[in-house]
Amino acid sequence: MKKEKNPKRFSLNDNVMDLADLKFLPRWVILFIDIVIIFASLIVSHLLIVSLEVRHYRVFPLIYVFIFIMGVNVLYMQIFKTYLGVIRHSTFIDLAKIFFANFCSVLTVVIINYTYYLMANEKVVLIPFLGLYFAISCLFLFVFRLCVKGFFNIIKENKRSSTRKKIYILGDDDTSVSIAQVILSNPNLPFDIQGFISYHDKKVSIKLLDRTIITKANFLNDLKNGLKEVTGVLVIKEALHKEELDFWVNVFLEYNLKIYKAPNMQKLRNNEMIHQINTIQIEDLLNRRQISLDNMEIKKRHFQKTVLVTGGAGSIGREIVRQVALLEPLQIVIIDQSETPLYDTELEMKEKHPHINFKFILADISNLGRLEPIFNKYNFSMVYHAAAYKHVPIVEDNPHEAVLVNILGTKNVALLSCKYKVNRFVMVSTDKAVNPTNVMGASKRVAELFVQALQNLDGNTTKFITTRFGNVLGSNGSVIPLFRKQIEKGGPVTITHPDIVRYFMTIKEACELVLNAGTMGQGGEIYVFDMGEPVKIVDLAKRMIKLSGFEPDIDIKIIYTGLRPGEKLYEELLSDNARTLPTSHEKIMISKDPFMHYEEIDELTELVIDFAKKEEKQEIVRILKSIVKEFKSNNSIYESLDK
């Protein structure tokens, strides 16, 4: 069946009115309409003059005078091109062209009028008549264009409103108004703003951008009574405290309203707005206010220096590279043993920072012979050691790999940093190293002990610093990307235990902590971060399901799979016998954990490395337990070693 091309529809019921999609009229049609308007202006001006009992000069027939005036006006319309603009898109410039065309035409007629008077001692046109004509013709031409423009705007608004999402903006301050203005001026955005929700309950009678302001109490009451047509709310996250954000999100989720996150005004670009308004994510709700850093001191530490980042293609390592690149270093060397992520990192960094000298090296940090030539070639000032195996169940099954990477790899990088007199070595550790219940945590604790012991080694000039934090939002293999994938597939969402809780921080926060620790540390410290309150994973999952527009256990099932080998219900940032000392930053503390002398930890690490090379799992774990006395296996085959 042959399709009809460009069907013309004028259905008012559907608010379609394809007039909004019509192309612009031919230029001669616009010129013809303008000529009709100026002729009408002459007639109206004539009638007004006659009603005032003022007579025209009778030198020439009146119709000839009118034709002459119109001819002069059309001439200037041609000169100023007043008919070339698309009427529905008329601007101040288009109106200015009309004004000057009419002004010049009247001025020309006045000059000709007085020239004729000097020659024949008679005037042809009344000056008051010309004044009236100028005012009326400008008014009529302006009104015509504004009416057409308004008519098309009304049609477009009606057409768009049928497909746009009707939303409220939370807040009635300057930021809310500014964002609303950008949305209203951008025809590509699929939002129709219904009004503003005031943070307060004081009723006001004014409107903002011709939209109503509804009080908090009235809005909540409307929700209870069934707020019709409104599908979502735009939230300006930066304007709310965490408690306020939690309150409003809970309200919106309860009534199945979509929650959209407005972009930061400092980063706002009108032409990019469509890409900047997204539904709010769980990361936005868990995120705390960012820590403030001494950026001048951090920049001084990295400016025109050569920096090494191990594990630079991983989640933490790559963010460290991103932040260091902003500090104008001389060179950044990135080492990783994973080929594809390293290549992806290379593409990203060279695109975003083409002026920075990057070196991407595919290498295994457990291979000392591969690492030493790198340290010998580059004069590193800072080393950020982020390379590690971190997945608890996999490492529990492969303890020898944990030893070779987390312990031997750390030992290699740390010893080379000491040998080549690197100014500062910053190690990325984990809260799982505290009172570990799994091989991964125990291996990271051994690495911490070795790095600390190096600080007091005779002849050492490197400052060895450790940072320890909890789960990182959005990192590879973390729970939130896993839940997101499971929700996208329709469930179920899998949780190991209904009571499991975790601390969370953003990747950006974690890396800011690493850079800050590398700057403030004097050597030998383990820095821990005030991570706020722990989050119950089942509550996290339920919120993510609701934010995706589903109901937990109805649309998306939640199932419990049982604790994995080595997993525990609660993570800690401090060991039982550790003390904390404050730092210059209220959110950052120093953990005073027990330490070991270099000779002792060096001998024990060599022993466990030997067994790792032989892949003797039981002996590896037994030695790890002898080094880390608080290491007690949980839900693991190695629990027998604790008896």
Image (tube, rainbow, N blue to C red):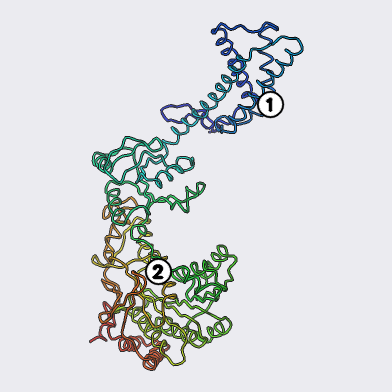
Report the front residue among 409 and 111.
111
Report the front residue among 595 and 138.
138
Coordinates of residue 409 in the picture (x, y in percent): 45, 83
Q: Is residue 226 above or below residue 279?
A: above
**Numbered marks: total:** 2
Coordinates of residue 230 in the picture (x, y in percent): 34, 40
Amino acid under disc 1: Gln
Report the front residue among 507 and 370.
507
Q: Is residue 53 above or below residue 222?
A: above
Coordinates of residue 30 in the picture (x, y in percent): 61, 24
Q: Residue at the right extreme?
A: 119
Q: Quadrant of the C terminus?
A: bottom left
Q: Closer to the N terminus: mark 1 or mark 2?
A: 1
Displayed quadrant of residue 502: bottom left
Residue at position x 56%, y 6% from top? 53
Report the front residue among 442 and 218.
218
Amino acid under disc 2: Ala
Coordinates of residue 606 in the picture (x, y in percent): 41, 91
Q: Is residue 94 visible?
A: yes
Relative side of 296 to 450, left or right: right
CA–CA distance between discs 1 and 2? Answer: 66 Å
Displayed quadrant of residue 544: bottom left
Q: Which residue is mark 1?
A: 78
Q: Which residue is mark 2?
A: 510
Find numbered disc 1 in the image and state the secondary structure of the residue it sits on.
helix
Mark 1 vs mark 2: give the one in front: 1
How crowded pointer 2 is (Cα within 10 Å; few <14, some 14-19, many 20+) is rated as many
